[in-house]
Image (tube, grey):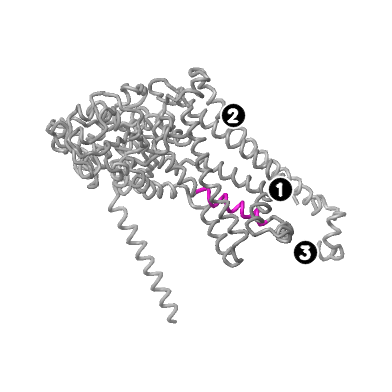
């Protein structure tokens, strides 16, 4: 080593890279192999992720679709009688519950988050903004079981007192817990997208004599529409897939929720309640897999939606 | 010089500690310390307090043995054993025989470990703490929905039930409700996953009724007397109180090695008459 460096001291590193030093395994060749190798490793890693996603989808679908060997398509999607002990596999009540819960969550959380986002992006002095944004980011990171526990110990007794019902478990409790969970997500991303609207837009609006209120609702929010939609879909995906917090406050009774205060069940909570207790290789087990596949399909569709909206971006 | 002295003192202290520790350790666990291995236990959450206590004591005696125990519902036990996920499946009925709703698990051995007494429990706010079998049947099937119909205050009855697959549910349904079906829906009906969840729900919901094994009953709830017989260990032993069942550890074939030793420990007179009794389970020997 020392020998080589003293005799070939004139050749700089760049030169050895371009021409090589003539040795059988010199730096140029080593780098070439390493670069190639690294590239393949990266490609393999990316392919691996795709493979995992594909395998998960395949497993869920293959197991789930076995349900229809015993249960008719229309029974699973149209019946609300879920009692696997007596061979009744009506999944509609869970699908309905999931959608009702998500919709209710969005109805409460979107207007609130939008107000928070507008407040953060336009009305707040910089120093307060710099304090509030990290707080919102921290809120996103709170584990869902903490929210569920607070729902169980604080929210449900409160609902019991306010409404006078006996239990308090149900869609309303779950939607309120989920609202608190998705609020920071939606408002932070909306805040970012409103902040990203070019200043010239609001300048022009003010120059035309618009008030601050008009500027916000007629210029800023419409310009940031795609970003806000992106935020809403992300929040929605979190609400649909949330399990732990929901299972603690929804009541887990397999019945169609015709009231906000009636204990019911959704896809996620039903899976987590029952999956450990069902015999393997039973229709019951397959039906739970099918529910898992439905959840997966719904959230994948949403992610596709997110990518599509992201591509659009803020129009300048 | 001073530093050197300090160093020497520290090293000496360290050596002394290690030496003493290694001298002490064998005297405590000399007999069984050769035993090593890993045991995974899953299944009944009713038996979980017992399993946890036993595994703590067993680990103290055999420091090289690792035990991980969890509870999700009885049926999980034999299922996990069949799949090879767990070495021991705790279950509240003899899973080698079929019970209503569950098939028999062939190729498994049921090792009797305890007598588990169960009781209907109500929230502290409920004054009707003595019910007949008929009243219990009516409450859990949803026919009676207000506490005043069974001699209590005017308040809704909140029925808390365990999810299908629970051994506590199987035992309670067979022995306290004489096989009557549970209600499956209603505005004041909910299902929970484990005995721990049941405990939380009954403690925190005014007007709630549920059922638990004695080990979970706290001062924040009341055990219901059935047909005038209070749910006490003595009443179980003298045969007046009927709602109890054997707890089993299911194994794949006859237990071997460390699993066998663990089950032996749980069945030993020392554990049965000591910790097991303290947890309000009943020793197997008491029921003969």
Chain letter of disc 1 in the image: A
Question: Can residue A192 be found in the magenta stretch?
Answer: yes
Relative placement, left or right, of A120 versus B101 is right
Determine if residue B256 is in view. Answer: no
Q: Quadrant of residue B148?
A: top left
Q: Earlier in the sequence, mark 1 or mark 3?
A: 3
Q: CA distance from mark 1 to mark 2?
A: 33 Å
Residue located 46% across and 29% down the image: A93
State the predominant SS element of the stretch in magenta: helix
**Residue position marked by numbered label 3 in the rendering:** A2
| Frontmost residue, A27 versus A271 | A271
**Picture coordinates of residue B227 (x, y %)?**
15, 31
Q: CA distance from mark 1 to mark 3?
A: 57 Å
Q: Residue at x 31, y 58 (%)?
A: B23
Residue depicted at x 33% and y 30%: B250
The quarter of the picture where residue B49 lies is: top left
Q: Which mark is residue A58?
A: 2
| Marked residue nearer the N-terminal end (1 or 2) | 2
Closer to the camera, B171 or A201?
Answer: A201
Badge 3: few (under 14), some or many (20 or more) residues near its Cα, within 10 Å?
Answer: few
Mark number displayed over residue A313: 1
Q: Mark 3 against mark 2, which lies toward the viewer?
A: 2
């Amino acid at each position: 080593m020392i020998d080589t460096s003293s005799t070939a001291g004139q050749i700089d590193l760049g030169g050895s890279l371009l021409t090589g030093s003539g040795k059988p395994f010199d730096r140029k060749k080593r780098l070439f192999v390493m670069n190639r190798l690294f590239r393949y490793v990266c490609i393999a890693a990316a392919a691996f992720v795709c493979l995992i996603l594909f395998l998960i989808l395949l497993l869920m679908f293959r197991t789930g679709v076995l349900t229809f060997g015993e249960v008719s398509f229309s029974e699973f999607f149209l019946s609300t009688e879920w009692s696997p002990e007596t061979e009744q596999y009506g999944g509609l009540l869970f699908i309905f519950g999931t959608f009702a819960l998500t919709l209710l969550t969005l109805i409460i959380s979107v207007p609130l988050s939008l107000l928070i986002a507008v407040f953060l992006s336009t009305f707040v002095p910089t120093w307060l903004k710099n304090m509030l944004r990290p707080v919102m980011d921290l809120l996103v990171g709170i584990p869902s079981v903490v929210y569920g526990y607070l729902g169980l110990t604080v929210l449900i007794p409160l609902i019991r007192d306010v409404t006078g019902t006996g239990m308090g478990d149900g869609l309303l409790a779950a939607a309120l817990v989920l609202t608190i969970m998705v609020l920071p997500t939606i408002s932070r991303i909306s805040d970012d997208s409103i902040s990203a609207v070019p200043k010239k837009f609001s300048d022009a609006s003010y120059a035309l004599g618009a008030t601050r209120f008009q500027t916000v609702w007629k210029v800023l929010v419409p310009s940031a529409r795609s970003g806000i939609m992106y935020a809403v879909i992300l929040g929605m995906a979190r609400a649909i897939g949330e399990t732990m917090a929901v299972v603690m406050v929804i009541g887990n009774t397999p019945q169609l929720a015709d009231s906000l205060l009636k204990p019911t069940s959704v896809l996620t909570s039903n899976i987590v309640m029952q999956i450990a207790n069902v015999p393997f290789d039973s229709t019951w087990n397959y039906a739970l897999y099918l529910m898992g596949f439905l959840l997966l399909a719904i959230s994948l569709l949403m992610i596709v939606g997110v990518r599509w909206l992201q591509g659009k971006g803020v129009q300048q | 010089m001073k530093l050197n002295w300090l160093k020497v003192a520290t090293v000496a202290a360290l050596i002394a500690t290690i030496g003493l520790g290694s001298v002490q350790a064998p005297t405590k666990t000399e007999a069984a310390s050769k035993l090593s291995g890993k045991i995974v236990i899953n299944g009944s959450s009713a038996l979980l307090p017992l399993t946890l206590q036993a595994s703590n004591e067993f680990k103290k005696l055999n420091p090289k043995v690792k035990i991980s125990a969890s509870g999700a519902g009885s049926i999980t036990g034999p299922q996990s054993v069949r799949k090879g996920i767990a070495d021991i499946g705790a279950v509240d009925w003899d899973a080698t025989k079929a019970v209503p709703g569950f098939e028999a698990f062939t190729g498994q051995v049921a090792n009797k470990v305890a007598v588990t007494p169960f009781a209907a429990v109500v929230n502290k706010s409920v004054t009707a703490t003595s019910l007949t079998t008929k009243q219990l049947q009516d409450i859990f099937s949803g026919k009676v929905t207000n506490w005043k119909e069974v001699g209590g205050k005017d308040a809704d009855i909140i029925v808390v039930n365990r999810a299908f697959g629970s051994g506590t549910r199987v035992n309670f349904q067979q022995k306290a409700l004489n096989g009557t079906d549970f209600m499956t829906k209603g505005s004041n009906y909910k299902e929970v996953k484990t005995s721990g969840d049941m405990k939380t729900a009954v403690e925190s919901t005014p007007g709630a009724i549920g059922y638990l094994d004695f080990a979970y009953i706290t001062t924040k709830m009341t055990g219901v007397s059935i047909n005038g017989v209070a749910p006490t260990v003595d009443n179980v032993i003298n045969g007046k109180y009927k709602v109890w069942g054997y707890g089993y550890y299911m194994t794949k074939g006859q237990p071997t090695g460390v699993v066998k030793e663990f089950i032996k420990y749980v069945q030993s007179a020392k554990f049965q008459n000591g910790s097991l009794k303290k947890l309000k389970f009943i020793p197997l020997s008491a029921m003969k």
